[in-house]
Amino acid sequence: MPNFFTDNPDILFHFNNFDLREIVEIAEDNYQQAKIYDYAPVNYEDAIENYRKVLEIVGDIAGNFIEPRATDVDLEGAHYKDGKVIYAKGTQESLNQLAKADLMGMVLPRKYGGLNFPMSIYMIATEIISRADASLMNIFGLQDIGEMIYKYGSESQKQEFLPKFCTGEYTGAMALTEPDAGSDLQAVKLQAYQDENGKWFLKGVKRFITNGNANVLLVLARSEPGTKDGRGLSMFVCYGDETVKIRRIENKLGIHGSPTCELQFNNTPAQLVGSRKFGLIKYVFDLMFRARLGVSAQALGISQAAYEEALSYAKSREQFGKAIYNIPAVTNILLDMRTMLESNRSLLYSAGIIVDRKEKLEEKIEKLKAENKPVTEYTNELKYLTKVANLLTPMCKYVLTESVNKITYDALQLHGGTGYMREFKVERYARDARITNIYEGTSQLQIVAAAGGVIGDILKEYFDKKEQKIYPGGLSRLSNYLKEIRQIFYDSLKYVLDKKDVMFQEVASKDLVELYSYLFVGYLLLDEALIDERKKFIANRYIINSLANARRNAENIRNELFSDLLHSDKILI
């Protein structure tokens, strides 16, 4: 009986070494919630044990219920009939199973029926679900809609929507994208208007909406007539009632169990969430923290599934009188896959904890303000955490979603011709992986989002401390390699800045972001190697590869391999 939590030693390593004390203390109101809810933890150890038990349940459902249905879900897909979307049979069964286990409101407060879990624990669950069926994550992961209503909605909105999110009666969707507003959400045109009684209505079209058939839709709309930029956009919540016409669902390459819809809003009654004009400049940006991490966790889950399939196949498939696992060229690919997989998990979980710290500190500050208590000592920390979160979330999505395409490609390659056939799961993983570095912001947009923090070197003090740390034995050599990578980064950054050429800087950003990621992940792995002997191999292989890649990144910048793109009026391809 597989369990995708307890069977994964790397997830267990991270879970057992998390330090979430500050996060949990704020989330649990210094454990005062235990006085209201008899199932709330009474101390930190109790909270961690609670998280463990729930993740074991998630792992069991994922391994023994969801994963066995995933192939049929992919083959059947979501149906569109008479203007309605019908989930694949296995999708609906899995959603029902998750709802019965009270897992559809993991991040929502107990007041509304949720589990009140931190983002970092929720990301583990999201990864596990994604390993079982990546398309299901696109429905399970939209708990974020409820989180946004909790964070910015009125109390009446919370009471109206959140309890049914927690029971699984409601699923949600983010209706952001339009035919002419994909990555550029400032171009959103869907109209929000008020009648003579001040009630809001929505009119227009949204496209490429994941789970657009949801009961509850969070909609970005233009509330300020005559505006054309992000300052004229507000956030609304509405029901997917008869005024919302599903015009079609997309026939996609992968994630077939997740319906992607085109929606037409026909004077749909809606409620304003939060304040007018803040829809894009505040609420969507906030939502991106969760969306980027969610897709990163999805990519990681697919990566784990592909690696497991490749490893199993390599051990069972015999050629030339031996298992192909024992052929050095195959073994080397598997080692690279495992190194990429585990280093990516370190990055995701670290980013999740940073977002947790940021958001829980925001909650603490708001509570102190309501009690007329000073908050000055916390504001500087919040500013720093916000900057780090703004760096790590796009970096995380860029690295993990590019990696999953490589991992699934290699997993299919190791299967040879059989991997190209529908009978093997690995071809589904390759198809499912491809969307991850497109939706919720393409890889190119993640580079743009991360570049400011990289060029500003916001992790300077963190890296300074790591350089001063004494690492024993063979880890000292790896520490020196990271120092060399850092010097390569600074030399490259200086070269770019000295150019005083904005376009050159923008094109060079990809290499700079990658250099910075080697440093951050390298130090994570180096510290992990101090704890667990098993992680020394991962740290060694990752850091040595990163040094070689860093030299390549620097050469790309210094040799200006892309210089022909910069100032030529005509580029012939």
Image (tube, rainbow, N blue to C red):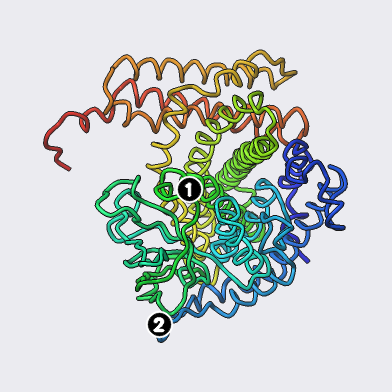
From where the camera sits, is residue 453 visible?
yes
Indicate the position of residue 5 as horizontal and vertical percent values: 74, 55
Callout 1 secondary element:
helix
What is the quadrant of residue 88 in the picture? bottom right
Indicate the position of residue 90 as horizontal and vertical percent values: 60, 77
Q: Is residue 53 above or below residue 490?
A: below
Q: Residue at x 47, y 73 (%)?
A: 240
Callout 2: few (<14), some (14-19), or many (20+) C-alpha neighbours within 10 Å? few
> CA gap, disc 1 to disc 2?
31 Å
From where the camera sits, is residue 318 visible?
no
Q: Residue at x 24, y 52 (%)?
A: 226
Residue 362 in the figure: left or right of residue 569: right
Q: Is residue 135 above or below residue 466?
A: below
Residue 417 in the figure: left or right of residue 192: right
Q: How many marks?
A: 2
Circles 1, 2 touching at the beta carbon (< 8 Å): no
Q: Residue furthest front?
A: 197
Check the picture and name the quadrant holding the N terminus.
Answer: bottom right
Q: What amino acid type should be assigned to the residue bearing mark 2?
A: Gly
Q: Residue furthest left?
A: 570
Indicate the position of residue 202 as horizontal and vertical percent values: 37, 66
Q: What amino acid type should be assigned to the residue bearing mark 1?
A: Tyr
- Residue occupied by mark 2: 83
Q: Nearer the viewer, residue 366 or 119?
A: 366
Q: Residue furthest bottom?
A: 82
Check the picture and name the quadrant holding the C terminus.
Answer: top left
- Residue occupied by mark 1: 283
